[in-house]
Amino acid sequence: MPHIVATTAVLRSDPNGGAMKRPLLLLVLLVVLAFPVVAEEMVIVPREVLEAIVDDNPNPPLPRYATAEELAMPPIELPEVLLSPPTGLVDCPPEYAHNDGLLIRWEDFNSILTAMTVPITTGDPDGIVYVVVSSGYYNSAVTTLTNAGADMSQVEFIIANTNSVWIRDYGPRFISEDGSRAIVDHTYNRNRPLDNQIPDHLAALWGEPSYDIGLYHGGGNFHLYEDDDAYMSELIVNENPPLTPAEIEQRYLDYQGLDVTITDPLPSWFDSTQHIDMWMLPVADREVIIGEYADGTAANTVTETWVTELTNRGYTIHRTPGWNPGGTHYTYTNAVIFNDIVFIPEFSGYATENAQAVAVFEAAFPGKTIIPVDCTSIIGSAGAIHCIVMHVPEVTAGLFADGFEDGTTLAWS
């Protein structure tokens, strides 16, 4: 049986009618019905099973980019008062470190979410998939995941209302403060107030401190390394006037202990999100996958500039193909590393590119299980699998586990 977490949230509005982010009033009921089960082998969902899963949301899913209606609305307001940053020792883990689980939001693109949930819950005996789901979709989520072969003892449901599937962009960013997990929150750069409240919701539910960084941001425009190097595109500057790049970089140093480098963005006509996770993926310390685009294209100009820069910084560079036929940006860097499993996108009609990407990932992640996930249905919404998950890092002995093969645990520095 799954873990069930039922919550009730109250959304407050400001006097001018715009949704504001406030501390949530939460009624929390936690019922633990799960028994520990150690998976003996990984189960990968057969394609025909995934094809039979029907997204039961009758409404078209919101895209990762802002809709015309959202652009015409005033943005969600930033916090009126910026709270002080953490006062303790702050560390921020990369995605390639060891993780306790993944956060996902259930309602749209359920076959894709299933394709990741089943291998995690059957192939990683400690991996938890935390499913944020509205009460109206809870039963169908349980049925779908059970029928697909997920180990439901490793699934925890969090009942909450949301606007969209893009939990990477609005979900919490986890840090360690003096060896305990905490949350750094931002204001979602889309006019989606229910999504914007999820980090506060989880902070209250899990009893973790939350620090609002006071920036408009989409979480996919962010990647970091164990040595505290981090990268974001210039979108973060464009969305946060009048702050200077130096002031934004200082926020990330103060709140997350990171040394941020701001890169060029891909042109918005090529990639409507301008998020760095659409062309970059950290592999390990000083190792990265960067999308490779046709000579003479605007995307090629950006990525080749950063291939040169990161090579000069001592990075090992891997390349996977990327392209944009008719307004859809296809990319393989929007992938998900979860401990010893790596999920990568694949696309119908692009067998050669899919095979090339698999070969690159196998070389970049020796010893890990590479699982392609069909992202044909989602890529037209300007995102793929990295966009619809948020990593929940493991805390071991007061520190984030480093995930090294020797099992040692080192302080983040």
Image: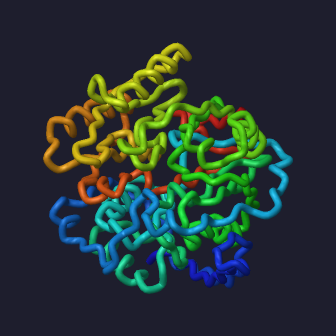
Q: Quadrant of the C terminus?
A: top right
Is residue 411 toward the left or the right of residue 58 in the image? right
The scheme the figure's colours follow is rainbow
Residue at 22% x, 65% y is: 50
Q: Residue 181 lies in what quarter of the image?
A: bottom right
Image quadrant occupied by the N terminus: bottom left
| Residue, far top | 312
Q: At 27% from the left edge and 37% from the top edge, which residue is drawn?
A: 323
Q: Is residue 17 left or right of residue 264?
A: right
Q: Residue at x 63, y 66 (%)?
A: 76
Q: Does residue 366 show up? A: no
Point out the residue furthest to the front here.
Answer: 72
Q: Estimate the x, y position of residue 397 in percent, counting from the top left.
A: 71, 47
Q: Residue at x 51, y 21 (%)?
A: 310
Residue situated in front as seen by the camera: 382 or 115: 382
- Which residue occupies the foreground of this view, 376 or 59? 59
In the rendered image of this protein, does residue 281 appear above or below residue 335?
Answer: above
Q: Position of residue 389 (x, y in %)?
A: 46, 56
Above or below: residue 146 compared with residue 265: below
Residue 147 visible to an observer of this rendering: yes
Total marks shown come to 0
Picture coordinates of residue 317, whole percent (x, y):
42, 22
Residue 197: image x %, image y %?
62, 69
Q: Is residue 391 left or right of residue 187?
A: left
